[in-house]
Each structure stands twice: as C-alpha cells, then as structure tokens.
Image: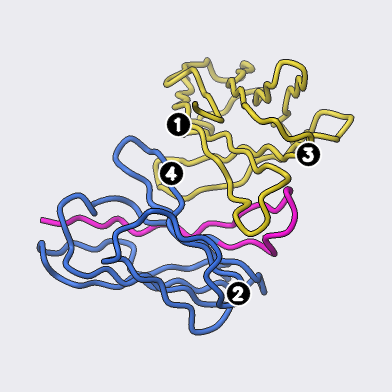
C-alpha cells in the first residue's frame, strides 16, 4: 500500500488566489515528520515546509502553510496568493520516527501545479 | 556558493558505456544520498552514506556503485549502461540520519540519456 498519496496529478489556479495541494499518509508510528518539496521546470528540488507529528501548531513558511489533520492523516499544502513562479511539481514526503539506519524519506507521486495569469 | 553540486548536469551516452556522476556538498553534512527520478517524476532512493559508511542500499542493479571518498563527496559510477537507466539522478545531503525532521538538500540533478 502507498504510504504517501497525492490524489491530484494536476491542478490549476488563478494568479493571486490560494490553492490547496492534498497529501494523505499512512503510518502506524506516533512520531514522524512530513515534508513538502517543490520542483520547478528547471529541475531542482526545493524544500518548502516541515511538520512534525507532535507539533501543536500548523507549520507556516511565508506564503506556504501546512494544514495538518493528524486524525485524518492528512498534511495538505496551502499556497496563498499564488504567483506565476509557483508553477511546478510539488512532492509530499514522510519520514517515520523508527527505523534506525533505514529511516528514509517516503515520497508521493507529486502534483503538477499550473498558475494562470 | 552552491550547497550541493553535482556534475555533469547532462550526460548523453551509448548503451554499454560506463559513466560517473560526481557530487559534493559544502554544508558539513554527515549523510549523503543518491536518488533516481524516472520519467513519471517518481523519486526513488538508491543509496545513502553516513560518514562514508553505506547505510541504505535499495534494490539497485550492481552495475551501480557508489563511492564516498570522504563525507563531503558521494560519486555514482554506472557500468554497462542500459536504456532503462535513462532518468534524472539527484544527489542530496542532510545533517544527520538520526532525526525525523532532517530535511534534504538536493543537487540540481543529472539528466542521463542512454541511446
């Protein structure tokens, strides 16, 4: 079973509007971390935001915020006031708290976001 | 200064050749990784090294051999290249492998095309 599910292969948003990119995860751990990365067409992977499973507040980084609903196992990324430069692939990832040496990031398949002028 | 740099950015080669991709990080991180991103954009970890020690070795053909001369460098050598090896290969690093909140810093990727 997939551990990270991003159900939206592609999304469109109008410039200056807000958009939510969905991410659900599956883990039996109590301790885990959730990440969002952005990959523009130039190809590099850019870290956006992190949420720990024990964090009481939703993470925010500038125009990015994470809508963390632990009971639903969802960690949706909210981008406010979309800009043309936000057009990119967005990846959700999780690292579980246990696993010792093998504590690797588990990645979703990504959501392609297009911002329309 | 580029934090994680990998070379070359593009690599076009014939089937059967041997090629290497180099990676260096100047962040002082202990852990480095190689990822493969296929044409559908799926990211799959290949290897991870911590202080020159191999700690993750996914099911990767043994034609792929990582080498870490020191903790700032992790190179990837590929023997007898096949068409299916065509992908983007990313190097990444993180401060350590201990914490669940360790974020990865990525290189800009190497687009490998095997003809």
The colour with which the image depicts chain A is yellow
Residue under circle 3? A31
Along the line of sight, the residue nearer the viewer: B87 or A73: A73
Is B99 inside the magenta-drawn segment?
A: yes
Image coordinates for residue B61, horizontal then vertical, percent: 29, 59
Are discs 1 and 3 less than 8 Å apart at CB?
no
Label annotation for residue A109: 1
Give the main secondary structure, helix, strand or loop, of the magenta stretch: loop
The magenta span reads B93-115
Identify the residue shown where x is 23% and y is 52%.
B86
**CA gap, disc 1 to disc 3?**
23 Å
Residue under circle 2? B26
Find numbered disc 3 in the image and state the secondary structure of the residue it sits on: loop
- How many dots with numbers? 4
Find numbered disc 2 in the image and state the secondary structure of the residue it sits on: loop
User: Do marks 4 and 1 both belong to one polypeptide chain?
Assistant: no
Nearer to us of marks 1 and 3 is 3
Asked if residue B34 can be seen in this view, the reply is no
Are discs 3 and 4 less than 8 Å apart at CB?
no
Image coordinates for residue B81, horizontal then vertical, percent: 18, 63
The colour with which the image depicts chain B is blue
Nearer to us of marks 3 and 4 is 3
Ranked by sequence position, the earlier of labels 1 and 3 is 3
Along the line of sight, the residue nearer the viewer: A4 or A48: A4
Ranked by sequence position, the earlier of labels 4 and 2 is 2
């Amino acid at each position: 079973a997939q551990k990270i599910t991003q159900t939206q292969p592609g999304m469109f948003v109008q410039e200056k509007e807000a958009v939510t990119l969905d991410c659900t995860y599956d883990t039996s751990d109590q301790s885990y971390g959730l990440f969002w990365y952005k990959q523009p067409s130039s190809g590099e992977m850019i870290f956006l935001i992190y949420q720990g499973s024990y964090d009481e507040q939703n993470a925010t980084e500038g125009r990015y915020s994470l809508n963390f609903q632990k009971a639903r196992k969802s960690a949706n990324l909210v981008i406010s006031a979309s800009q043309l430069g936000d057009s990119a692939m967005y990846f959700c990832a999780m690292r579980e708290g246990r696993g010792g040496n093998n504590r690797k990031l588990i990645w979703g398949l990504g959501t392609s976001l297009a911002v329309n002028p | 200064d580029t934090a994680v740099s990998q070379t070359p950015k593009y690599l076009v080669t014939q089937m059967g050749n041997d090629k290497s991709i180099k990676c260096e990080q100047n962040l002082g991180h202990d852990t480095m990784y190689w990822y493969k991103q296929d044409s559908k954009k799926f990211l799959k970890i290949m290897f991870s090294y911590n202080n020159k020690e191999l700690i993750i070795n996914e099911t990767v053909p043994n034609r792929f051999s990582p080498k870490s001369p020191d903790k700032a460098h992790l190179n990837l050598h590929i023997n007898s290249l096949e068409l299916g090896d065509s992908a983007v290969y990313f190097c990444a690093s993180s401060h350590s492998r201990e914490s669940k909140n360790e974020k990865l810093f990525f290189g800009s990727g190497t687009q490998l095309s095997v003809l």
